[in-house]
Image (cartoon, coloured by chain):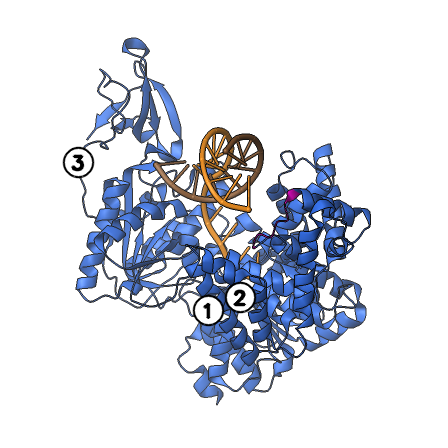
Chain colours: A blue, B orange, C brown
Amino acid sequence: MSSSLLSGLNPEQYAAVTLPAVPALILAGAGSGKTRVLTTRIAWLLSTGQASQHGILAVTFTNKAAKEMLTRIAAQLPVNARSLWVGTFHGLCNRLLRMHWRDAGLPETFQILDSADQLSAIKRLLKALNIDDEKYPPRELANFINGNKEEGRRPHEVECWDDYTRQLKALYEEYERQCRREGVVDFAELLLRSYELLRDNAALRGHYQARFRYMLVDEFQDTNRLQYKWLKLLAGGGAAVFAVGDDDQSIYAFRGANVGNMRDFETDFKVDTLIRLEQNYRSQGNILDAANALIAHNRGRLGKNLWTDQAAGEPIRVFEAASDFEEAQFIVDEVRQLHREGQNLSDMALLYRSNAQSRVLEHALFQSGLPYRVYGGLRFFERQEIKHALAYLRLMANPEDDNALLRVINFPARGIGNRTLEILGETARGGGSSIWLAACSGGAGRSSAAVGKFVQLIEGMRAQMAGLNLTELVQLAIEQSGLIEHYRNDKEGQERLENLEQLVSAAARFIQDNEDSVTAFLTQASLEAGEHEAAPGQDALQLMTVHAAKGLEFHAVFLTGVEEGLFPHDNSLSSNEAVEEERRLAYVAITRARQRLYISLAQSRMLHGQTRFSIASRFLSEIPEDLLKWLNRGYAPAAMPTRKIEKTAPEHGLRVGANVEHPKFGHGVVVDYDGTGKSANVQVNFGAVGVKWLALDYARLTLIN
DNA sequence: AACCCCGAACTTTTT
DNA sequence: GTTCGGGGTT
């Protein structure tokens, strides 16, 4: 059976799949069959009897990847999904903590705060402590807390050099106290708590170390410090860790991912098996050559060169538009043409660096009537009506859940205003109790009638819970809370009503596939907020950020806005590391394309309410010229944007948007000007070199075009 | 409690 | 330019 399992693997893939039980690092380039290697290795370990389902742990970053892995394993051999530990870091940690809640010091039915819940918990904390949230913005405090947790630091381990940090640290401590009191755990806490559980409980640690002899890690370049420590601890008994990653696709340093983990892994685990998967099965030659050439400009890589046995294929098409509007129009025309030639719209993607860029593109697409789908909006379980419904469900399970209570005590409106809430909050804090208990004791001043009614409502709902299954509980929650009623009366509530109905169906599906448990359902809702994409229906063009495109592939890719300041983004220009991450991002974008790649840029675009002029991205010049086909080389920019330019035309003729050449700084675009005659200055954007004010009288600028 | 207005932000984001 | 959120008003 293993022969059919292994057939069709190339030599490197084969070597990786059949490695003995030693720690190994697999450098898997884009499109090199990484998921196949991971799943086949698991199937091989199982089918050869080297490992039991019980002894394997495989960890990914997204639920999507975890599901994909499970599905593909199941396609190769019969597996028991329960005994295989395949999941996200957070999912597996949750699993561990649910099993050992007592040892972890958690209540049996602890709830998970998603980022939005965490933020509102922090706001509530600041209010309760009377802290000025101007001086300590909740966002910042959240970052501080999460950042420390992701480094494995509890409050007492935070080093302070100034009063401000000392205060943040004190708030971190208070936040922990609040979470403990309410029996809730945020995302970072799931990781840290289970790390500490294993670290401090020798018996448990020994058990799991002995159990998981094989550990496989996907997207290793995206692990953060704590995740790495977690893996190291769990593998401490000599487990064979099979780490798969690609340092060139590390694009999440900004949220704590530490590529350095790959180097550390080599030394810490004494890895002497490093396998490179460099054969790419996705893209044609020119596309790969472009990607390779681009990424070669980064320093400190582990080193890797993708190759293919496919033909060179088409050149990369480059289009330089005069404006963002024209860029969008060009794309619409090309997409239309490809579609006429028989390409599915869903096999084409428009990629951009930042979400704001989608606007112009969407506008042009909308006008053209081409169906399109934008990734990245609100997900199902993040919608307010869903969060409201779940808050009622939470209250039914545990009315002392302050977060949930505050979310819905006055939604739908029932006459409980801010003043009442303040009184309730103070009473609760004074008595060291939950807000629910304060509400029950009637300490709500004049509005106590309304509060009493709310207490009655929740108690009434709780009284009806016995004997109901999850689906019926959800139904009860949305009906008796008045949510349904409220949205039915709301002119714009139609979609929300439908979502609430979908929630009932989601619950029904959940109890079919899982256990009939409110806690489990709520946990899943926090851990998997749902798909990012709109309902897949008709064939539609795909629009998304480059980040969102990671892991996907398309017949044709349009990489848009390839301009200095946008890609690489202005905010990344200050450090070389940041620019290198942008370059990796561009590398990811390019390697999404199978056959056709378009790179487009606009000489001017609306940004932050004003027209901005930019030059081509340095990344474009890092791609060998012979791979590119300029669709409009020598193209004269169209008239300046129709918007009137405030200033009178300068007598030197260097109007905003003019292309100039400087002997030292190279090619640039005039962005602004000032003064006349001998004191005339112009501001020029030289892209990589920066934006500079130059005295026209001295600077030897030549007008080009 | 609904409404309105003004100011601030505005790169990327999974769990 | 637009949106989002907070604060003030009706």
Q: Residues within 10 Å of mark 2 (few under 14, many from 20)?
A: many
Relative to the observer, which residue lies in front, A428 or A222?
A428
> Can residue A432 be seen by looking at this rendering?
yes
Q: Amino acid at mark 1?
A: Lys
* CB under 8 Å between discs 2 and 1: yes
In this view, A522 is above or below A562? below
What's the mark number on residue A218? Answer: 2
Q: Position of residue A312 (x, y in %)?
A: 25, 61
Do dots 2 and 1 share one subunit? Answer: yes
Secondary structure at badge 2 equals loop
In this view, A615 is above or below A204? above
Secondary structure at badge 1 equals helix
Q: Amino acid at mark 3?
A: Ala
Do dots 3 and 2 share one subunit? Answer: yes
What kind of secondary structure does the magenta stretch mostly adopt? Answer: loop
Secondary structure at badge 3 equals loop
* CB under 8 Å between discs 3 and 1: no
In this view, A402 is above or below A139? below
Q: Position of residue A60 (x, y in %)?
A: 55, 66
Direction from residue A93 to residue A245 in the image, left or right = left
Q: Position of residue A316 (x, y in %)?
A: 26, 53
Numbered disc 1: what chain? A
Query: In the rendered image, which residue does mark 3 sit on?
Result: A636
Residue occupying the far top of the picture: A678
Relative to the observer, which residue lies in front, A104 or A70?
A104
Instruction: Report the magenta residues as a range.
Output: A412-418
Q: Position of residue A341 (x, y in %)?
A: 17, 64
Query: In the rendered image, which residue does mark 1 sit on?
Result: A34
Numbered disc 3: what chain? A
Relative to the observer, which residue lies in front, A163 or A370?
A370
